[in-house]
Amino acid sequence: MKKISLILYITVILEFNLLCYSQNVVSPYEVGTWLGFCNAAISYTFDDNCSNQLALAVPMFNNYGFKLTLFTVTNWSPNWAGLKSAALQGHEIANHTVSHANFGTLTVDQQKTEISTASNLINSNVTDQKCITFAYPYCAEGNDSLCALYFVAARGCQGFIEPSTPGNFMNVSSIVCGNLGSVKTEQDFKTKADNVASSKGWLVYLIHGIDNDGGYSPLPSATLTASLQYLNANKDKFWVSTFGNVARYIKERNCLSVTETSYQDSSITLQVTDTLDNELYNVPVTVRRPLPENWSSAIATQNGLPINASIVDIDSIKYVMFDVVPDGGEIELIKTSATGIKTSRGSSPVDFTLDQNYPNPFNPTTQINYSVPKSGYVSLKVFNLLGEEVATLFAGMQHPGEYVATFDGAGLASGVYLYRLEAENVSIARRLVLVK
C-alpha cells in the first residue's frame, strides 16, 4: 500500500470513530441517549437473503411499527423487488458482500472489491435509500479503515451488548440467535432486553433462518413474534430501529449543539446542529425542555413545518419533547391552549389550508395543522377508504387562526385513511398512513 493511501485510511478511521464526544447543550435542554428518551436501542439484523425474512419478518415488524436491517449477499439471488418494497416501508437494505467471503483470508484490495461491488449493486437496485452499513461474513473482521470509507458502521458478532457509544463503529458487536446461537427462547430475548435496558446500551441481534427456510441457525417465527410483543408492550423503554439509524443517531447525539436563540411569551426559537455530513446524518434526535410555567401545551416546527412533539410529565415536571434533524433549520416551540389553537403571532390566515399530517406514516398519533381565515362552522374528520367516518377531530365554530389537531389511531387497523377539512363551500382532503 502506498504511503498516501495509508494516511488516507488512518484519517478516515479516526474521523469515523472519534468524530466527537462532546455535546454543547445549553440548559434547560436535554438530549435523549436514545430516540424518545428510551432506556435502550435494539436492532434486529438478518443475514444471507433467507426467504422468510421478507415473507414473515418484514410483515411481522410492520405490524408493530418496528424497522429491521437486511444484510444482503448480492450474488445469492436476492429478491430485489422484495428488498425494494421493504426499503419503501422504512427497513434498511445493507451490505453483506458479493460472495459471502471470509475477510480474514482476503487482501485489502479483495475486500474492497467485495464491498464496493455489493454496495453498487444494492444502490442500483434499491434506489430509495443509500447502503450505509456492512456485516462481516462469518464475523471475520476485515480492514476497519477500508470499511470506514464506505460505511457509517459495520457489524461483527462478538456476543456482547454495546454501551451507548460503541468502542469501534467498524466492528459493532451482535448476538447470534436461533438454535445455534445464545438467544434461542422467548425468555432469552426478554432477558437480553431487560439487560440492555439496565445498561442503557445498544443490543444488536443477528438472525439468519426463520422456521424452515433453510437458513443457518433457524429461529421459530413464534419466538421472534414473542420478542417483538414484549418490546411493543414496553415502548417507553425500547427504541427498535435499523442498525444504520441507531449508528447515525449515536454519532449525531454525541456531536449535538443546542442553542436557544429567542424566548418570548408565546414562542421559543432554537438551533440544533452538529458537525457531520448533513446528506448522510439526517436521523431525528430527541430533545426536551421544561414547559414554561404559563404554557399549558406546545407544538414544535422546523423550518415552519410540524415535527413530532409531545408533552410528557417527569417527576412532576412537564416537558415538551420533540424529534429534530440536526442542521435542518430553525426550530420553534409554539405555545398552544388545551384546545389546540396556536397563540396568535400575527395577522389572520388569508385562506383555508390543510397541511399534510406529520409524522406520516405514523403510529399511533400524528398532528394535523390547518388554518381558518374567518369565523364559521368547521369540521375536521377522518375516514377510511370506504368513506366511513372513523374519527371527528373537531366540529364546531372556530374563529380566524391557525390550529393543530392530534389524531390517535391506536384503535384502528394499519392502512390508508383520508382526513377532510370542511367549512362553508370549502372541502380539502389529504391522505395519511397508519403503520403498526
Image (cartoon, rainbow, N blue to C red):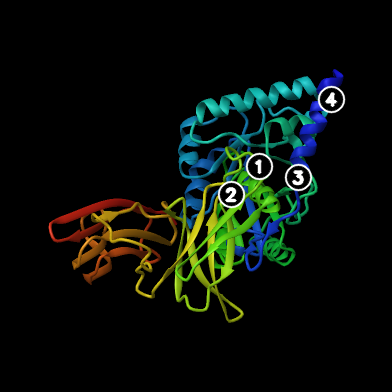
Name the secondary structure under disc 3: loop
* Mark pair 4, 1: CA separation: 23 Å
Instruction: Name the residue: 47% across, 49% down.
Output: 59
Q: Name the front one of labels 3 and 4.
A: 4
* Mark pair 1, 2: CA separation: 9 Å
Q: Amino acid at mark 1?
A: Leu
Which residue corresponds to mark 4? 6
Position of 93 compared to 418: left or right?
right
Measured as percent of width and height from the top left, residue 128 is found at 48, 35
Measured as percent of width and height from the top left, residue 359 is found at 43, 54
Crowd rating for badge 4 (residues with CA inside 10 Å; few <14, some 14–19, many 20+): few
Name the secondary structure under disc 4: helix
Task: Please report contact status of discs 1 and 2: CB closer than 8 Å, yes or no.
Answer: yes
Which residue corresponds to mark 3? 157
Q: Is residue 158 above or below residue 420?
A: above
Q: Amino acid at mark 2?
A: Pro
Which residue corresponds to mark 1? 276
Q: Name the front one of labels 4 and 2.
A: 2
Measured as percent of width and height from the top left, residue 409 is found at 38, 63
Q: Name the front one of labels 4 and 1.
A: 1
Q: Amino acid at mark 3?
A: Cys
